[in-house]
């Protein structure tokens, strides 16, 4: 299929992009990497009147440390993040997840901001952002604001972004010596959408864990925090009994729907398999 007709504009700055969005009165989409948007345009799942190209906006493609966080610009390509020593050192969960995103051609064009803004429930990066307790930097007509990941994802491909907002960066707390991360997904073949995936973060307290965050993807309309399983993992030594309790807690945390990849019960079983794998990653030295 071919996309429905649309107008095209290049934004010179974030402020110009907001102006173009405002003039379009909600009937516009931002184009960055286009790895998801172009497909939805071609299938006519998205039919905006105006397409706003933000690729030439300066200052949105940087990776930096700022105020105890790794700030990743919205236009950072997946491949750039994959090669970044700063991300590998200070945000290793992102470094672990990025190679699972599509294939090299997709990672060469797809952007960090686009993945977060589109909020595909089967995508890796939204779950990583949620697991890490990160923030999203948004600029709109009223200025810049910061939205916590827990408040950003609202529903199926629905976020806290308004029709005149531009996502400019994500911010991730710097990895500490006591931080433990884990990532695993199950897919039919590498690069396909996950059947089930899990991004996780915790802090060690002696032999126990605290501040456990388990963010599942491909099990609901958004990335899903498994809060009961988090509580079951925290507070004591990691052993088979604690693993079993955490897996059992998933029965109340997750209610995955059937889809073309697997039934809900199969997804819930696989979620338990991934939980055991990721919990064992917590036990590995940083």
Image (tube, helix red, strand yellow):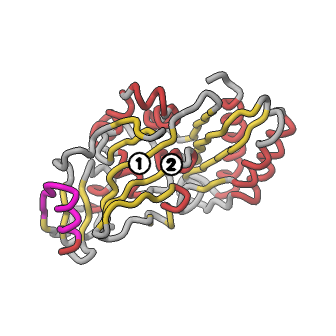
Provide residue 187's location: percent of width, then percent of height: 53, 41
Please report whichever mark, 2 or 1, sits nearer to the chain's N-terminal start: 2
Q: Bounds of the magenta span?
A: 8-21
Nearer-the-camera pick, 178 or 220: 178
Side of 206 relative to 165 (left or right): right
Residue 194 versus residue 214: which sits nearer the camera? 214
| Residue 270 appearing in the image | no
Distance from disc 2 to disc 1, alpha carbons, whole Å, reads 7 Å
Query: Which residue does the numbered mark 2 point to in the structure image?
Result: 134
Q: Is 241 positioned to the left or the right of 79 in the image?
A: right
Residue 157 placed where, x, y %? 44, 63
Residue at image location 74% in from the left, 37% down from the top:
209
Task: Check residue 15 for magenta coloring.
Answer: yes
Answer whether labels 2 and 1 touch (C-beta < 8 Å): yes
Say which quadrant the N terminus sits in.
bottom left
Secondary structure beneath dot 1 equals: strand
| Residue 233 falls in image quadrant | top right
């Amino acid at each position: 299929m071919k996309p429905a007709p649309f107008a095209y504009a290049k934004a010179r700055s974030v402020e110009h992009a907001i102006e173009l969005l405002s003039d379009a009165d909600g009937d516009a989409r931002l184009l960055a990497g286009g790895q998801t948007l172009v497909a939805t345009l071609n299938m006519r799942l998205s039919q905006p009147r105006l397409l706003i190209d933000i690729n030439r906006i300066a200052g949105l493609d940087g990776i930096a440390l700022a105020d105890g966080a790794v700030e990743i610009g919205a236009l950072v390509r997946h491949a750039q993040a994959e090669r970044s020593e700063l991300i590998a050192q200070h945000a290793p969960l992102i470094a672990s997840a990025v190679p699972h995103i599509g294939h090299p051609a997709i990672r060469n064009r797809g952007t960090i901001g686009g993945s977060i803004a589109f909020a595909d429930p089967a995508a890796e990066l939204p779950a990583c952002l949620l697991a890490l307790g990160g923030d999203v930097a948004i600029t709109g007509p009223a200025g810049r604001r910061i939205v916590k990941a827990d408040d950003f994802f609202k529903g199926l491909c629905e976020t806290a972004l308004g029709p005149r907002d531009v996502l400019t960066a994500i911010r991730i707390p710097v990895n500490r010596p006591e931080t433990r991360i884990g990532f695993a997904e199950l897919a039919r073949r590498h690069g396909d959408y996950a059947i089930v995936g899990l991004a996780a973060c915790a802090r060690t307290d002696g032999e126990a864990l605290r501040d456990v965050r388990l963010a599942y993807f491909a099990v609901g309309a958004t990335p899903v925090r498994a809060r009961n399983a988090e509580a079951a993992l925290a507070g004591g030594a990691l052993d088979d009994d604690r693993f079993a309790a955490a897996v059992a807690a998933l029965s109340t945390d997750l209610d995955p729907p059937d889809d073309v990849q697997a039934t809900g019960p199969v997804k819930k079983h696989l979620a338990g398999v991934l939980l055991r794998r990721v919990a064992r990653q917590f036990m590995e030295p940083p």
